[in-house]
Structures are given as C-alpha cells and as structure tokens.
Image (cartoon, rainbow, N blue to C red):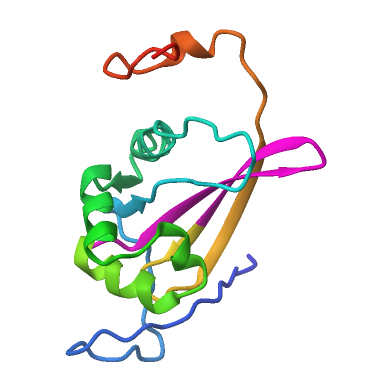
C-alpha cells in the first residue's frame, strides 16, 4: 500500500507545544469559520452586488463544512478599522488582525471583473491565520432574463 503525503505550513500557537516526529495531523471536524467581504466591482456596469456576500455565505454554510460570519458583523469590523475588503489581498497583516477580531480562519474576497467582453466573478480565499492567498476561483457570469424575480423578499424591486 502506497502512503500519501501532504505538505503544510506550521503556524505555532503561543503556549502550545511544537509538533514532534510521529505526531499525527487531522483536519478538524468542526466547521471552519469564514467571513465574506462586500464584493469589489472592477467593471463599468455598476451592477447591484448587494446579494453576493449573502449568496456566497449561504453556499458555504450549506456545505456543512463552513460557518459564515454575519455580513453585518463583517461590514462593521471593516468600517471600524477603515479597511476595504480588497485590501486583504495586498495587506496580509490586515487579514490576520481583522480575522482575530471576528474569530475566523478565512476570508472570501469576491471581485467582479471584465475581460474581453466577459464578466467574471473571481473569489479568493485568504487565510486569516497567515494572511496568504490560498486559492482563487473565477467563473464567467451570464445574464438571466428572470433576474428580477430572483431577489430576496426584503430587497427592493429593480425598478426602485
């Protein structure tokens, strides 16, 4: 039987002993706390992106692997620290400091961008432990004719 190996970065926790040879490793069975920041719109469309954090958080929560922080809390922490969500892409120390204040281990940074006439939603996972960007996913978006009916009940209609 072939043994598989993984590679990881050890981040020491103050007051805890360092790892020793033959120590086992496991991913916690608990849910991973994640914060979704308000999206950044780098397009000229000026789309209504208010639902994006809610939809991403809901999708994460439904996996039962993640627990999303309330978007109101995320917005409040960003506002009080005078930080824009996208700053965490270039300032790892902010991701770590603000992650501690929300007790999260990861940040989702959604960015709406356009390339060659196609609009994409790009979402980057930033570690709230190290501040490093761990992975990013980009999906092209398509227009839906029934987009107006897909709103949450508390949101104003698109004519408003």
Q: Main secondary structure of the magenta part?
A: strand
Q: Which residue is at 36% across, 73% downward?
A: 94
Residue 105's image quarter? bottom left
Q: Nearer the viewer, residue 10 or 29?
A: 10
Q: In the image, which residues are magenta? A: 103-124
Percent across and percent down for residue 40 are 51, 49
Q: Which residue is at 65% across, 67% downward?
A: 2
Vertical order, 9 against 80 (above or below): below
Vertical order, 125 against 50 (above or below): below
Q: In screen coordinates, is 12 left or right of 5?
A: left
Percent across and percent down for residue 7 are 55, 76
Vertical order, 78 against 45 (above or below): below
Queried whether the magenta region covers residue 29, the answer comes back as no
Q: Which residue is at 43% across, 73% downward?
A: 131
Q: In screen coordinates, is 49 left or right of 27?
A: right
Q: Which residue is at 36% across, 34% downward?
A: 54
Percent across and percent down for residue 126 are 46, 63
State the quadrant of the N terminus.
Answer: bottom right
Queried whether the magenta region covers residue 108, the answer comes back as yes
Vertical order, 53 against 24 (above or below): above
Q: Nearer the viewer, residue 29 or 128?
A: 128
Q: In screen coordinates, is 126 left or right of 105?
A: right
């Amino acid at each position: 039987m072939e043994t598989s190996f993984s590679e990881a970065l050890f981040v020491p926790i103050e007051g805890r002993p360092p790892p020793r040879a033959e120590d086992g490793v496991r991913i916690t069975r608990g849910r991973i706390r994640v914060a979704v920041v308000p999206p950044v719109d780098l397009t000229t469309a000026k789309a209504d992106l208010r639902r994006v954090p809610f939809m991403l958080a809901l999708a994460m929560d439904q996996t039962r692997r993640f627990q999303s922080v309330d978007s109101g809390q995320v917005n409040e922490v960003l506002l009080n620290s005078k930080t824009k969500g996208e700053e965490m892409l270039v300032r790892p120390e902010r991701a770590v400091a603000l992650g501690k204040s929300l007790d999260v281990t990861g940040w989702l940074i959604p960015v709406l961008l356009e390339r060659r006439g196609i609009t994409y939603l790009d979402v980057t996972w930033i570690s709230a432990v190290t501040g490093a960007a761990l992975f990013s996913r980009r999906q092209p978006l398509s227009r839906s004719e029934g987009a107006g009916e897909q709103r949450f009940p508390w949101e104003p209609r698109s004519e408003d």
